[in-house]
Amino acid sequence: MNINITETDSYIHFICGVVCISILFYICTRNRAKYMITKIGYNEKFSVKYVKPNRLIRKHFNIKENYIPKYLYFELWFSLLFIILLIIEIILYSFVNLFPDLIIPLFILIIAQPIIGIINLVWLFIPYFIYLDSFKKIKNKFKKKEQK
């Protein structure tokens, strides 16, 4: 049996791969930020590091908390970057046949997207452990005061 993969089939597989990667990065970034928002909570002692999310963010991401950490607010906006990159990649890919010079920016975007995702993952967990550790210390102090 001779299977012949045409050029059109490879283009379709390529676009499907790019779409899957972009949507996965969007979903993962959004879900991590929402999980951390519920895990960290709100502490008045660090009220300077919190921001009240606007209506668009609350509605789109289904956030019920009044105040969230600033870095997680930025993270929610950053997750939308992956959808914007997906749209740009599809537009560039559709014009590659007309303008062959667009292949270089397209591949730069495609290669940069996982790199941005990995850097984002590392950047997201550093403040998370700082916030979580400081909250544990504060909660332990309050528990000790209540026990006395």
Image (cartoon, rainbow, N blue to C red):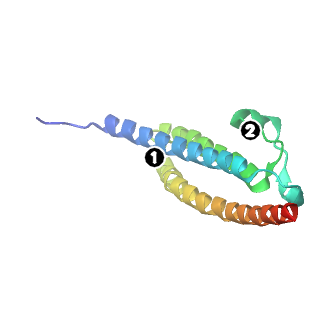
Residue at which label 2 appears = 63
Residue found at the very far top of the displayed protein: 59
Does 55 sit above or below residue 48?
Answer: above
The quadrant in which the N terminus is found is top left
**Residue 124 vs residue 15, the one in the foreground:** 124
Q: CA distance from mark 2 to mark 1?
A: 43 Å
Q: Secondary structure at mark 2?
A: loop
Question: Percent from the top left, x then y, of residue 14?
Answer: 40, 42
Q: Identify which amino acid the numbered label 2 is placed on.
A: Ile
Q: Position of residue 17 (x, y in %)?
A: 43, 42
Which residue sits at x=55%, y=59%?
A: 118
Where in the figure is residue 78, as x and y percent of width and height? 68, 49
**Residue at left offset 74%, top offset 38%:** 63
Label 1 belongs to which residue?
Answer: 100
Packing grade of label 2 (10 A; few <14, some 14-19, many >=20) is some
The amino acid at mark 1 is Pro
Q: Position of residue 103 (x, y in %)?
A: 47, 49
Of residue 136 and residue 3, the one placed in the foreground of this image is 136
Name the residue rendered at 84%, 55% in the picture: 43
Question: Which residue is outermost to the front?
Answer: 148
Mark 1 closeness class: few <14, some 14–19, many ≥20 residues within 10 Å: few
Q: Taking 3 as reference, is 110 left or right?
A: right
Disc 1 secondary structure class: helix
Q: Is residue 85 visible?
A: no
If the image is split into quadrants, where does the C terminus sit?
A: bottom right
* Mark 2 or 1, nearer chain start: 2
